[in-house]
Image (cartoon, rainbow, N blue to C red):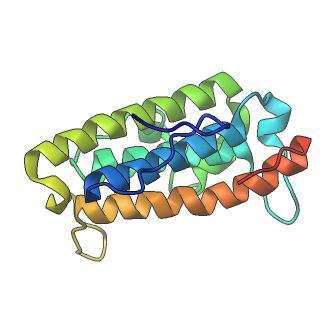
């Protein structure tokens, strides 16, 4: 049974196998982003803190894209769905960040939550097929083929880095602080 902290986040296990530990830390960081973006309206999700153009809404949309990209497109070589397939990435390499301001808080949260749920299913499928050593079906542009283990660690890093951004952005919106 998971221990849930005062912000509603599942604490990662302190003594578990590798898979449980990695998934525990990833879920903790996902829950941290949920907490940092909770209960905000459009103004809160589009607020900026100089000198960056980053927003909490942009963070939600970016990590939704990262979830679908790594666990869907790369790990399983699955085609991308909307909104990713209709994005003009050539015209705007940061499309997920810049387009988030046009999305409602409900749309952003649903997009992110859907991506997280798809990632969980895809991860379980890869674990059942070959465990942490399962290699991505789509190689990176440099020709390397990361394992599921690498992808999970990369996703933990991705969330941890962006949760630091979320701390600062959320504090600037309404003063909410905390790890």
Could you say which is closer to the camera, residue 104 or residue 15? 15
Q: In this view, does 80 lie to the left or right of 161?
A: left
Please provide percent x and percent y for residue 75: 24, 52
> Where 116 sits versus 67, above or below?
above
Is residue 153 found left or right of 109 in the rendered image?
left
- Which residue is at a point 20% across and 58% down the rendered structure image? 132
**Could you say where residue 120 lies in the image, as x and y percent from the top left?**
33, 38
Q: Position of residue 52 (x, y in %)?
A: 80, 62
Quadrant in which the C terminus appears: bottom right
The quadrant the N terminus occupies is top left
Return the x and y of residue 137 as percentages of the image width and height.
Answer: 17, 56
Q: In this view, does 85 lie above or below 167?
A: above
Residue sitting at x 54%, y 50%: 29
Q: Compared with residue 7, is residue 12 higher up or lower down, i.e. above or below?
A: below
Q: Give 95 or 73, whichever is nearer the viewer.
A: 73
Residue 93 visible in the shown view: no
State the residue in front, 58 or 16.
16
Q: Is residue 4 visible?
A: yes
- Residue found at the far left of this picture: 129
Closer to us: 12 or 114: 12
């Amino acid at each position: 049974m998971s221990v849930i902290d005062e912000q509603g986040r599942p604490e990662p296990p302190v003594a578990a196998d590798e898979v449980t530990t990695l998934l525990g830390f990833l879920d903790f960081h996902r829950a941290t982003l949920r907490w940092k973006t909770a209960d905000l309206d459009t103004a809160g999700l589009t607020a900026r803190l100089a000198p960056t153009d980053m927003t909490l809404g942009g963070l939600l949309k970016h990590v939704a894209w990262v979830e679908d990209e790594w666990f869907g497109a790369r790990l399983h070589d699955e085609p991308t769905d909307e909104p990713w397939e209709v994005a003009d990435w050539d015209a705007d390499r940061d499309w997920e960040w810049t387009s988030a301001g046009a999305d409602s808080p409900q749309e952003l949260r649903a997009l992110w939550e859907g991506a997280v749920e798809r990632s969980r299913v895809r991860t379980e499928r890869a674990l059942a097929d070959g465990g942490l050593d399962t290699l991505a079906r789509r190689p990176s542009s440099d020709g390397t083929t990361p394992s599921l283990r690498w992808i999970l660690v990369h996703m933990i890093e991705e969330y941890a880095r962006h949760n630091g951004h979320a701390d600062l952005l959320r504090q600037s919106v309404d003063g909410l602080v905390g790890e």
